[in-house]
Image (cartoon, helix red, strand yellow):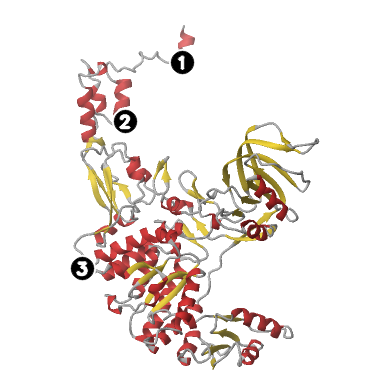
Amino acid sequence: MTAHKTLLLCTCDKTQSFDPEALRTAAAAGQVIAVDQLCGNDMKTAADHLGASNELLIACGQQAALFERLGEDVYAGIQHCAPFSTIDIRDRAGWSAASAKPGRLHAKQAALIAAAQLPAPMAPAKTIQSSGVCCIVGPTEQAIRMAELVQDELGVTCIVNDAGPIQLPSAAYDVARGQLTGAYGALGNFKLEFAQLQTLNPAGRGALGYGEVKATARSECDVFIDLRGVGPAFPSHQKRNGYFWADPTKTGELERIALTARDRVGEFEKTVYFKLETSLCAHSRANRTGCTRCLDACCTEAIFSAGDHIQIDSDICAGCGSCAAVCPTSAVTMNETPFEALVKAMDVMARVYREHANEAPRLVFHTLKTGGDAIAYLARYDDGLADDLIPLGLENTDRVGHAEIMAALGAGYAEVLILADNEIDRRAVAPEVELAQAMLKGTHNSPSRVRIISAIELCNAGDNAGRVSEPVLLVGGRRDITRVTVGAMADKLEAPIPLPAGAPYGAIEINSDKCTLCLACVSLCPTGALGDHPDRPEVRFTENACVQCGVCKSTCPETAITLKPRLDLSKDALSARTLHGEDPFECIKCGTPFGVASTINRIVEKLENQHWMYKNSDNVQLIKMCDDCRVKAQFHGENAPMAGGERPRVRTSDDYLDS
């Protein structure tokens, strides 16, 4: 607690209540002041404290813009002012159903304020330069009209895809005719490919004509406007910065696009949402494909294969976080919402709520914009959030994976809900929810404790009897916290928990009848889950390290390996165990063990008296020797195939003097 911090509370015209002392403690403030109309009759109170030297926290997020303008006016005549911030506790924890328990609401308010005091992660940014080079693709009439709308701010080239007439040539923009065949990139760095391209010839009198046809052509631009009237050129096109797609079913699309496209000139700051550690990536080894989870999950196709690991185009990445949510090795992590920060926020909110309400809360993940608007609407016009439901806003709910869900359960939440904005987001998080539900089912908990919901379900009361264990210590990475949480929720497990196909936990099985112990799987395992024995041919396996990437399966020349997704919580999963092994073959000359006994015997069986080199000879004995003895036998043995003639005696000076 600091005496240099002030907390301003507002009852919003006496429509909400709170516990000032509890909120002061949660905010670590020296003093708390409560009023009824901070944005109206009591605005002078806000102005007085905005100009004071104390750090200020205003518990009203709805009028944040008003307080920002008020602060600018107050700061104009003051050289040194303390910073201020705002937080919403009204829509999220103040306005609720008439049947809501005040103790729960007050506990939730304290939890939200306590989490707001945590340091916000800082994401790095990069600079994108746009010179305003714009390419407009579409029918002649719409393309020329769009060019007229943006030509004053952008350098325009129109690529028309029909034979529509052009009445008069313009020096303000170029025109060509062709068909778009490919597109890549984002603002400041689009690369477009065209077929059957013809440039317009503006010279001469009469009808305009096009020049020679080029079978293929490429172009680069900073801004790409797509008016073709067909599907977008990119997946999740709304997240592609600098790309504008006109929906042919809507009116006023050209004017709407022009208003925004004209501003895409100059330097822009682009957040680098992710951090990639390629040494941890289990994508591929020796051209054998393994994990492709992030490639499959990326909605913008910003991720691509780069050999043994993946790469992410930071210009295209929209920061949804789905790659970090599904990455089994934490090779991809988020700068903006790192796992550690999410876990800390969930832990703090759950702990503060329990301290005040003496029961377990529920948690709902939602998007800051669409989900936040839905919460605000329900609060004003409906029953609002359930009194025990704590909201946690993210830029994208794709960021939520099974590890985040299990961390929330480990923090003590009775239920974990995900408010999906649309069907696309619902499908994106469904596999991770299914994985978490499988873990709950395996520990004899109700899978319904984790589910995807719609906005109307935010008002529904929950069942706080669902928590079966005390909160666990949330320390470690994603896999560590998942394992600890699931172990704490399970009373007693006699067998591993079966998981859906594609889960990043599991074992492998080796068909001993097929395996030749070539150890190719061991040499390429990216996580070290597979190992060998220093003294004998043997494949050893540490299940806790296996991420089910499949490199071993794709590498095995005998197709002897099968993946088995499951979660083994026993201590056996933490140590290496033997999957398959055999006795080594001992050299018939020196007795040194080498190779695999079954393999050597199989080779001898196939070659002895079957191949011309091994008929009526002792050559088959070479197969039964170690490398050193085989070389000696080939060069120095009787009838050795590589033996040379007897070497001549070395002549000395005495030999020459005596002759």
Q: Position of residue 284 (x, y in %)?
A: 42, 45
Q: What residue lies at 72% left-to-right and 35% top-to-bottom?
A: 209
Q: Between residue 64 and residue 656, name the one nearer to us.
A: 64
Q: CA distance from mark 2 to mark 1?
A: 36 Å
Residue on which the image places disc 1: 652
Relative to 241, residue 441 above or below: below
Q: Is residue 314 left or right of residue 481?
A: right
Q: Secondary structure at mark 3?
A: loop
- Crowding around mark 1 (Cα neighbors within 10 Å: few <14, some 14 to 19, many 20+) is few
Q: Secondary structure at mark 1?
A: loop
Please identify, in this view, whether the residue under mark 2 or under mark 3 is nearer the observer: 3
Cβ–Cβ below 8 Å for labels 3 and 1?
no
Q: Is residue 508 left or right of residue 276?
A: left
Q: Position of residue 568 (x, y in %)?
A: 26, 59
Q: What residue lies at 60% left-to-right and 50% top-to-bottom?
A: 226
Q: Between residue 245 and residue 559, name the one nearer to us.
A: 245
**Lower position in the chain sequence, tag 3 or tag 1:** 3
**Lower position in the chain sequence, tag 2 or tag 3:** 3
Please identify, in this view, whether the residue under mark 2 or under mark 1 is nearer the observer: 2
Looking at the image, can residue 135 be seen?
A: no
- Crowding around mark 2 (Cα neighbors within 10 Å: few <14, some 14 to 19, many 20+) is some
Q: What residue lies at 29% left-to-right and 28% top-to-bottom?
A: 629
Residue on which the image places disc 3: 492
Type of amino acid at the residue the image marks with label 3: Lys
Q: Position of residue 397 (x, y in %)?
A: 45, 65
Type of amino acid at the residue the image marks with label 1: Thr
Rendered image: mark on residue 627: 2
Q: CA distance from mark 2 to mark 3?
A: 52 Å
- Crowding around mark 3 (Cα neighbors within 10 Å: few <14, some 14 to 19, many 20+) is few
Q: Secondary structure at mark 2?
A: helix
Please identify, in this view, whether the residue under mark 3 or under mark 1 is nearer the observer: 3
